[in-house]
Image (tube, rainbow, N blue to C red):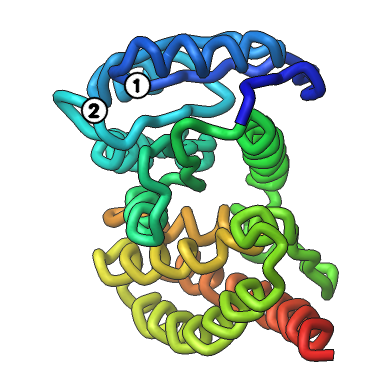
Amino acid sequence: MPFSTDKLPPFEPALRVLVADDNELNQLVVCRALEDWNVEVALADNGRQAVELATAQTFDAILMDVQMPEMDGYEATRRLRSYPPLLRLPIIGLTASASAEDQALALAAGMNATLAKPFDPALLHASLAHYTRLSAQAATQQRETTDPDAPIDGRIEPDWSILEELASGNEAFIAQIITTFLQQTPALYQELVLSSTDSGSAVQARVAHKLKGQVVYFGVPALQVQLEQLERPGTSLSAASSQQLVDSIGKHLSLLYPQLESRLQQHSS
């Protein structure tokens, strides 16, 4: 498709984005698009440089090439996610092959999403707008969700744009994702409940990470923030605080399930 960013609005306020890619031509193409959108760009030629820059400077998002020398994008993302201040930083993978396997590897490493190269400017713009907005929402909710006793208003509204974007409007695929989530998540949550007796354990971290990978498709930042607090092995949370977090996550899930079931009913009708 022709490369054009003429109809895509600039970001206000401006964004600061780190582009990690070892290909100079790719850097030029991405930088042209970003600069047209009021984005300040910093460049890294490999994963190691990306980790060094992202842990030393502040960015609104990272565009991470998957295949790079010295350290690939997956390993760089894993290292960045091990650094607590960067747990919610949007990381969007760039890959020459946007296969289902690539998506799974990206999510497992901690990326928010992947985009195929050569990228669609409109999709890149939409992804940046979406994930930086989610990141800001999560940051404003951090104080509230760190307190497991914070009140829950009885309703959760999923942000369907993530799933709709991935599914390209295919309702049958969306229904399949929802159905799989509803089938698998209750058992995962029960694993989390069982692991809560051992706060900071590797088991608790693994289950919380897997559950967050399921939840991320539905755009519920408050729930993601709580799971992030449990997914780090060796967390300093007390056993009581860990249990309270697990209970709060369960309450959030119980509010999310009816919203997903409602979407399924709309599809079937």
Q: From the viewer's perspective, is residue 267 above or below residue 9?
A: below
Label 1 sits on a secondary structure element that is loop
Q: Is residue 124 visible?
A: yes
User: Few, some or many C-alpha atoms within 10 Å of disc 1 (few <14, some 14-19, many ≥20)?
Assistant: many
Q: Residue drawn at (45%, 88%), measured in percent from left and top?
A: 187
Residue 148: x and y in percent read 62, 63
The residue wearing badge 1 is 21
First in sequence, mark 1 or 2: give its number.
1
Q: Residue drawn at (53%, 12%), measured in percent from left and top?
A: 31
Q: From the viewer's perspective, is residue 182 above or below residue 103?
A: below
In the drawing, what numbered circle is on residue 68? 2
Residue 179: x and y in percent read 59, 85
Label 2 sits on a secondary structure element that is loop
Name which residue type carries label 2: Met
Q: Quadrant of residue 192?
A: bottom left
Labels 1 and 2 touching (C-beta < 8 A): yes
Q: From the viewer's perspective, is residue 266 above or below residue 199?
A: below
Q: Residue drawn at (37%, 50%), measured in percent from left and top?
A: 106
Q: Is residue 139 visible?
A: no
Q: From the viewer's perspective, is residue 153 above or below residue 82?
A: below
Quarter of the C terminus within the rendering: bottom right
Residue 97: x and y in percent read 37, 46
Name which residue type carries label 1: Asp
User: Few, some or many C-alpha atoms within 10 Å of disc 2 (few <14, some 14-19, many ≥20)?
Assistant: some
Instruction: Between residue 267 and residue 12, name the one nearer to us.
Output: 267
Residue 227: x and y in percent read 50, 61
